[in-house]
Amino acid sequence: MNRGVAEAGRAAGAPAPEAGVEEFEQLRDLILVAERARLASLERRLGDPERRAEELSDVLPESLARAARRSKRLGVALSPVLDEAFAASIRRNRKRLAEVLSPLMGPGIRRAIAEALRNVVDSFNQILQHSLSPRALRWRFEAWRTGRPFAEVVLSHSLLFRVEQVFLVHRRTGLLLQHAAADATALHDGDVVSGMLTAIQDFVRDSFSVDAERAVDTLRVGDLTVWVEQADRAYLAAVVRGTPPVGLRDVLRDALEAIQLELAEAFEQFTGDSAPFDEARQHLEGCLQMQAVRRDAGRRWVAPAIVGVLTLLLLVTWLFFSMRAGRRWAAYVDRLEREPGILIVSEEQGLRRSSISGLADPHAVDPARLLPDYALDPARVTSRWAPFVSQEPAMIVARARAALDPPPSVTIDYADGTLAASGSATSAWLAEASRRALTIPGVNRFDAARVSDAAVAALRPLQDRLERLVIRFDVGSA
């Protein structure tokens, strides 16, 4: 029946299918309008990168925190990314990284430098005590015979100490983790000692406003010395009888670093039980070192006395050479002050180098040539001399001789602006000298009245001979 109706409708030209489709579309829109709106909103949300990033930023920290608590795979997965990001940050902004790390690195570097300097001073003091004595001569001979360094021989013979006890103490709680003693009966309660050390550290920090990273590293009680080496999670305290060597601190420091490295997990999980730290005992026992070599107490004054005498001799020698150099320099400066054509502006004498500066006429004596006359090394004297024209008579005469080039038979003098020449010279030189003399700085008049003509002077002996000659004629002869 419906088929017939449809065929009848098509035969009549009615648009039944289009009308049904439109109605179906309208019906679907009415039924699915809410779902379509949600789908469109979801599509816009997923297609907007900024909105997705903002929503992800709200849940990402909590997701990372949960993943880190559940497993360590997150750290392993992010490690390459963080390494690359850290390297890129360093390359991009090194100055900022230096500003961040400097507050952390500065105290550590200063502490390391101070520790190194203190070790050097202690080592120097110990070696110096045994370097100037008959025993030292024997040690030098032994060093030469065995081929060992002298410092090694000194240390092997002179160290007198014994590490009696070593304590490993938890830094945060102050509890004793492990203890080792050279004599098993020496200590009955190690917790008391560890508590005392911790109390002393806290007292010093609170009373003197010391930084939390700093601590007491040395305690002295009679002939007992307590050396304390600090680390992040624990500290090591060694009770030493006698004079401990400088290298003992390195032994304690290495042992503490090895303990923290090997028992890192035990430190993280520490709740008051010291049983997991039994493995640290072997490192503590390695610190129980000793060397019992008695020194002759009656001759301890010999080395300091010799050192004092040598120091006094060195001081006297230095004063002698310093005063002698000062006298030589003063004599040199006095000589230059008396030299014509030289004007000293400034001079300074030093232990290794001296300097002098001023004005010097080109025709004056060279100041550098006078240095060897006073046993002064020219290589240690800095000289700066500026040229100038001196008006001293000696300089004017020297300048005139250089300009006029007189023969050896002519003498030149200067007084009150007048340049006077005396002696014998050729008429050509006399004419040239009269013309050039007034161009010399400081010469206002040239006097050549006492200069005779050399040609006329050469004829004068012949004239005298002719005047003495008498010619006689015979009487009555032509």
Image (tube, rainbow, N blue to C red):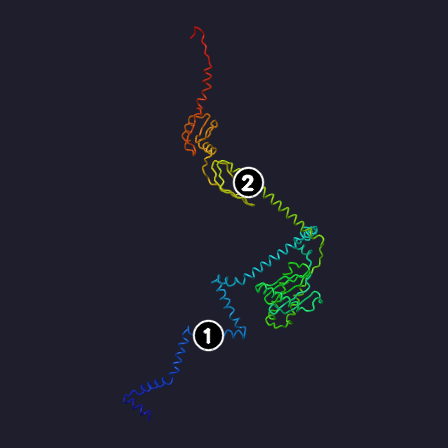
The percent position of residue 385, horizontal first and vertical second, equals: 48, 41
Q: Nearer the viewer, residue 202 or 340?
A: 202
The percent position of residue 121, horizontal first and vertical second, equals: 62, 55
Q: Quadrant of the N terminus?
A: bottom left
What residue is shown at x 37% (from left), y 85% (from top)? 31
Element type where label 2 sits in the image: helix
Q: Between marks 1 and 2, how big is the CA–CA gap?
A: 85 Å
Residue 17's disc is none
| Other-residue count near label 1 (Cα within 10 Å), few / some / many at <14 / 14–19 / ≥20 | few
Residue 330's disc is 2
Q: Nearer the viewer, residue 20 or 435?
A: 435
| Other-residue count near label 2 (Cα within 10 Å), few / some / many at <14 / 14–19 / ≥20 | few
Q: Which residue is mark 1?
A: 58
What residue is shown at x 55% (from left), y 40% (from top)? 330
* Mark positioned earlier in the residue sequence (1 or 2): 1
Q: Quadrant of the C terminus?
A: top left
Q: Which residue extends farthest bottom?
A: 1
User: In the picture provided, is 4 more to the left or to the right than 249?
Assistant: left
Q: Nearer the viewer, residue 287 or 129?
A: 129
The amino acid at mark 2 is Ala
